[in-house]
Amino acid sequence: MSPTANGPSFGKRFGVALLLGVPGIAALVGYVYLTTPPTAVPPGLSLPLLAVASAVTPLLLLVVACLLGAYAAPRVGLRSYVIERSGTGDGVWRHLRGEVRLAVGIGVLGGVLIVVLDAAMMPFVGQDLPQSVIGATRPTVSDVLAYAPVRFLYGGVTEELMLRFGLMSALAFAGWRVTGRRADGPRPAVVWVAIVVSAVLFGLGHLPALAQSVALTPALVARTVLLNGVAGVLFGWLYWRRSLEAAMVAHASFHVPLVVLSFAQVATV
């Protein structure tokens, strides 16, 4: 892995990355619009306006992440086949197909692991969690279908652009600069720090939304950070050792067991 200044310009890398993340933002807007009851709309707002407003913060985070990643990722040798080969005519699938099986396997096994860990931690959390993998809330088929695009597009693509392409790349670049700009890229220890820190911040980033539903307790905070952090480490390793697209495939595959479990919950109602 070696830093490189070759490939598309900064502006093109930023633009392609941003376009990749927009469908996930749109999926989030659609989910808010389809699932928000009229009684939950604040006075003075219409439901369409509320749905669009829900995209403002994620869109700003996406823009910042794409700016960071467009600058930092190529300088520390972190790969994205789509972003690096935009406009070159070089087939992305030719590079990615050798990584898909590993990415899907890691994603699905990671999803199963999270289900098991969530079940093991529930006695310590001691309360029903609306966002828990095995929470007592029972979704409908419409709920599961409405949230599926958010899982696969926002989670699988947009969050990977934010957390891996943006944050992890920036942390690896900062560590590379601080520890000495080796010609062959940052030391493995530097990259591991970037992987773990971005994964922990990913877990912490889920707390504000969770706090809107339940009172946060130390056990609940630990559970949320741990479950999301484990997944983040897996995706970060794939980004480092394979590509951003491999991390995206793994993140999307990670949600497959969770969707299956959601349908199982529907069937038990």
Image (tube, rainbow, N blue to C red):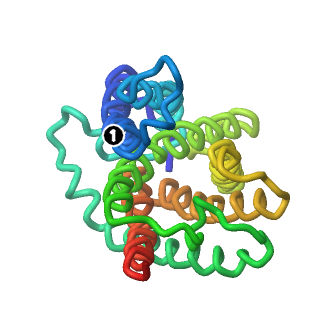
Tell me residue 125's x, y (percent): 77, 69
Tell me residue 14's x, y (percent): 39, 26
User: What residue is disc 1 on?
Assistant: 30
Query: Does residue 145 lie above or below 7 as drawn?
Result: below
Q: Is residue 266 left or right of residue 131?
A: left
* SS category of the residue bearing label 1: helix
User: What residue do we see at 35% from left, 49% from top?
Assistant: 153
Front-most of 75 and 168?
Answer: 168
Q: Residue furthest right?
A: 218
Tell me residue 38's x, y (percent): 42, 36
Counting every numbered tag in the picture gives 1
* Amino acid type, label 1: Gly
Q: Is residue 104 left or right of residue 56?
A: left
Front-most of 133 and 256?
Answer: 133
User: What residue do we see at 66% from left, 52% from top?
Assistant: 203
Please say whether residue 66 is visible from this viewpoint. Answer: no
- Which quarter of the figure has residue 121? bottom right
Q: Residue furthest left?
A: 89
Q: Residue furthest front?
A: 39
Front-most of 184 and 56?
Answer: 56
Please say whether residue 130 is visible from this viewpoint. Answer: yes
Crowd rating for badge 1 (residues with CA inside 10 Å; few <14, some 14–19, many 20+): some
Q: Quadrant of the C terminus?
A: bottom left
